[in-house]
Amino acid sequence: MTMLATLLVALLASAQPVPDCHIGAYRLTDGSTVDIAPADPDGLRWRRIDGATGKLTHGQGDTWSSTLGWTDRPDHKQVTFTDCASGGIRFDGVNGHRIAFEVHDTVFAGDGGTRLVGRLILPPGKDRVPVVVLVHGSEHDSARVWDAMQRQLPAEGVGAFVYDKRGTGESDGQYTQDYSVLANDAVAAVAEARKLAGDRAGRVGFRGGSQGGWVAPLAATRSKVDFVIVGYGLAISPLEEDREAVAFGLKLKGYDQSVIDKAWELSDAIGLILSSHLTQGFDQLDAARAKYRNEPWYKDVRGDFSYLVLPMSSDEIREKGKAYMFATPWRYDSMAVLRKLHTPQLWILGDMDIDAPSAETLRRLGTLQAQGLPITTALFPGAEHGMTEFELAPDGNRVDTRYANGYMRMTLDYAKGVLHTPYGASTIVFPHAGTPTAP
């Protein structure tokens, strides 16, 4: 994410890509696949199942040049497309052809009858396949446009159902972060996916990324699914998320717990302001800012949303904050949901996630594993939010270079029902004495 902050920054500036007929999944002659997706504002992005990725920039004719990950550094890969009708590609010297999926566009009713727009994409053929319902995070963009998993999964034999959540894309309704409403929408989505897939539906489950890691497990308590996959989600509340993110960021800067305790006074005051719908906490925040703003660590306070609020005056917070009251359940009790969920779950986390730090979530999931709940966890070293690896720019900011190796393959295998370790450098904890198979 950031789960909230990404939205706060980008909500009113969401770029819609120029439609490009080259967008699709391609099977190369060596048997591998590559996905070509939109990249804002004016390019394309390729992704491989092993996590490699780059941005494509249009050059001469129909030739595109690539830069590594999200950097501006050339990776020397060249991509050439044939005309759109024939659907050919030459990727890094290997020819390929666009995969002809079975596609069902649909409109269905979510919570309260809200009109939602979705799409089921199945691999070619007649075989039964797993189907993953993609529950996206806090972003305001259309999942049907931007979520590359809708093609990556079918390209590897797993069906995908993608939908624009309420208030985004072509779906009706008002944008919300009410997890209960979003969970009911997800329940409607899984029912629609099953209906459209018909006899081709094998195992059916949810995959929730980021904020979807709160929504998907809740939806699974309200529907019968075979599995839940959570990517870089949390078993703590949104308020706890900011506290954990403040602490993690300061630890990375070398500060000790005494500094973190002081910074938490700022985070807690901001959390009170947001969770009280801008009615409380201002005096506490003003007092904490006056007390600590000259401390050397003050400039390094980040968190999930604290860094956005700290520079604002109380009047600015009251005025600008009105636009971001989305019915977020700030004190949401994830553990209460997870304790009663007996659906097999896979949690994929990164140990360098600065926006949604994984340590406390991993600890809490461990207590549930010890109680016999069917939870598998995988921690990927060096991975941050979005399961991307990164390098540090000269200014200290992170620049993503690729997705973690093993992340997508593990997602696919869990949906199919059998894990084949290892998955990159991840540390995996299984629910029952370590058998490497998904139920």
Image (cartoon, grey):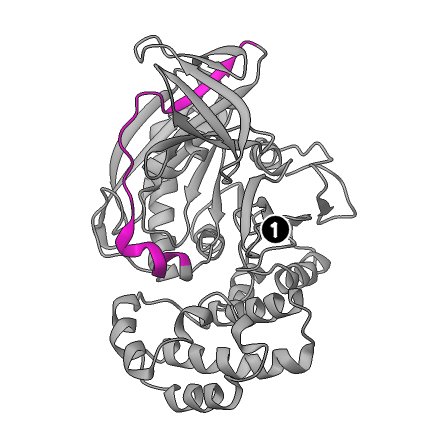
Q: In this view, does 199 lie above or below 28?
A: below
Q: Residue at x 23, y 57 (%)?
A: 174
Q: Which residue is drawn at 44% across and 89% down?
A: 284
Q: Which of 63 and 158 is in front in this view?
A: 63
Q: Nearer the viewer, residue 273 or 257?
A: 257
Location of residue 12 in the rendering, given as x and y in whole percent from the top left corner: 26, 55
Q: How many labels does the image show?
A: 1
Q: Which residue is drawn at 54% across and 17% down?
A: 92
Mark 1, Cα crowd under 10 Å, few <14 / some 14-19 / many 20+, is: many
- Region rendered in magenta: 6-29
Q: Quadrant of residue 55?
A: top left
Q: Is residue 315 above or below residue 436?
A: below
Location of residue 104 in the rendering, given as x and y in whole percent from the top left corner: 31, 26
Q: In which quarter of the image is the C terminus?
A: top right
Confirm whether the magenta stretch covers residue 151.
no
Instruction: Tell me, yes or no, if residue 327 can be seen here.
Output: yes
Location of residue 269 in the rendering, given as x and y in whole percent from the top left corner: 45, 83
Q: Which amino acid does label 1 sit on?
A: Leu
Q: Residue at x 42, y 46 (%)?
A: 135
Q: In which quarter of the image is residue 366?
A: bottom right
View extreme (right): residue: 433
Q: Is residue 11 left or right of residue 350?
A: left
Q: In this view, does 402 lie to the left or right of 80?
A: right
Confirm whether the magenta stretch covers residue 16.
yes
Residue topped by disc 1: 349
Element marked by disc 1: strand
Q: Nearer the viewer, residue 404 or 130?
A: 404
